[in-house]
Image (cartoon, rainbow, N blue to C red):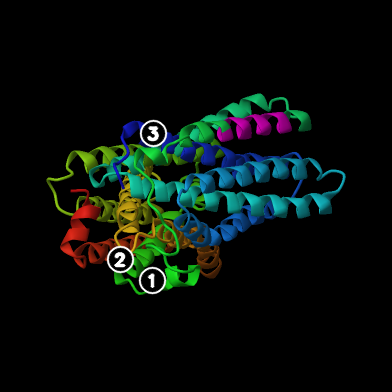
Amino acid sequence: MQGSFGWWSIVRLGAVQASIGAMVMLATSLLNRVMVLEYGLAAGIPAGLVAWHYAVQLSRPVWGHGSDMGRRRTPWVLVGMAMLGLGALTAVHSTTMLDEARGTGIALSIVAFTLIGAGVGAAGTSMLAILASGVAPERRAAAAATTWIMMVCGIVISAGTAGALLDPFSEERLFNVASGVVAVAVLVTCAAMFRLEDKVGVIARDAGGDAPAGFADALREIYHEPEARRFTLFIFVSMLAYSMQDLILEPFAGLVFGMTPGQSTSLSGLQHGGVLIGMIVTGIGGSAFAGRMPVELRVWTMLGCLGSAAALIGLAMAAAFGAGWPIAANVAALGFFNGAFAVSAIGSMMGLAGAGKRTREGVRMGVWGTAQAIAFGLGGLAGALGVDAVRGLTGQVGTAFQLIFAVEAGLFLLSAMLAMRVATRRAPAIALGVAGI
């Protein structure tokens, strides 16, 4: 590597992440609502399509390996964005077919969400590999915060704009709005990626050099690295804990605290606001103290996990205490520590991606992205089914939420222990590099 990315280059990569988020929003949020309300589909069908797009992302290691084997990763990002855009527009077209040819429309939707999952896997994994290989250690926490905050902003801006332009709803308006979002996202990505890799130089990754001969060799190499295995386990457990409250927080607010749908939605917004603040504070703190505190990102990771566990214990107590508990402050605290944990974990991931015997950033990012995708899918499902199961067995709403929140807290405590093991069982040189000093 001839150099490292400056802040403007990091912002450009953040713009790519925002573009990915904007197009994914069309499928996972906007079309979800349209399918159920405007076309009368059962809610399980769009939910199943969203789950399928996560399943397709299990191909992330393959995309990462492909970008490792080439001389440049930019083409993989652009091809992935093209697939994602095509999938989003195909999903819109299939949705408009639901009235006249429901079976054909659903079948085409499966194809569309396959393209969306593959596009996210190809573009997202390759973009993260570029970020991991091009950002200086002392900037990793802030770089992770910047890119993820921009992704959230991309989702919020595109959702707000698309929602405003869709009123009054029509199929023609839906296609025009979706086409506009896709066009802007692709153009922004092309502009952001233009000659970006030239700023840090191109690392040759041909078969006769540093790269393993094949995909199986790359996976075998990572499997035999204890550090990579431990970090994969950490990602899975922590993201499982992170995602378990996704589908139960608003029902909890309604069933235990008697909140209206509007009030529970506002509570969810408060949580997301806390996540953004946690990301910003961790991004600034992780860079401001780089070089002064050893294993800085690990410190933030463990604090985020421990704080999240404490906040979830608070929610478990709230389930027993009921009205009068400071639920808003509790949820905001959960969001803050979730954001702190997420950014520091991503920053650590960026450092570990190139810390092995060979620089296999793409495959490593793909493996960890796969662990995250599996955990997200299982977490939301386990949280919702767990509450239903305990409620059915005991007939007690509060007891059901208490148990699930307690399980989440336990998973975050386990995550903190796993993060500590990753931090303390490292060779000194690698530990310093990952810590950002």
Residue 214 seen: yes
Name above or below for residue 352 compared with residue 157.
below
Q: Which residue is mark 2?
A: 357
Q: Which residue is mark 1?
A: 221
The reply to whether dot 1 and dot 2 touch (C-beta < 8 Å) is: yes
The residue lying furthest to the front in this view is: 208
Residue at x-position 38% and y-position 69%: 222
Q: Amino acid at mark 1?
A: Glu
The magenta region covers 174-186
Describe residue 72's horizontal placement relative to residue 261 as left or right.
Answer: left
The reply to whether dot 3 and dot 2 touch (C-beta < 8 Å) is: no
Q: Earlier in the sequence, mark 3 or mark 1?
A: 3
- Distance from label 3 to label 2 (Cα)? 30 Å
Q: Earlier in the sequence, mark 1 or mark 2?
A: 1
Q: Secondary structure at mark 2?
A: loop
Q: Which mark is residue 11?
A: 3
Residue 84 x %, y %: 61, 45
Q: Nearer the viewer, residue 264 or 192?
A: 192
Residue 184 forms part of the magenta stretch:
yes
- Distance from label 3 to label 1 (Cα)? 32 Å
Residue 199 x %, y %: 36, 38
Q: Amino acid at mark 2?
A: Lys
Name above or below for residue 307 compared with residue 192.
below
- Distance from label 1 to label 2 (Cα)? 9 Å
Badge 1: few (under 14), some or many (20 or more) residues near its Cα, within 10 Å? some
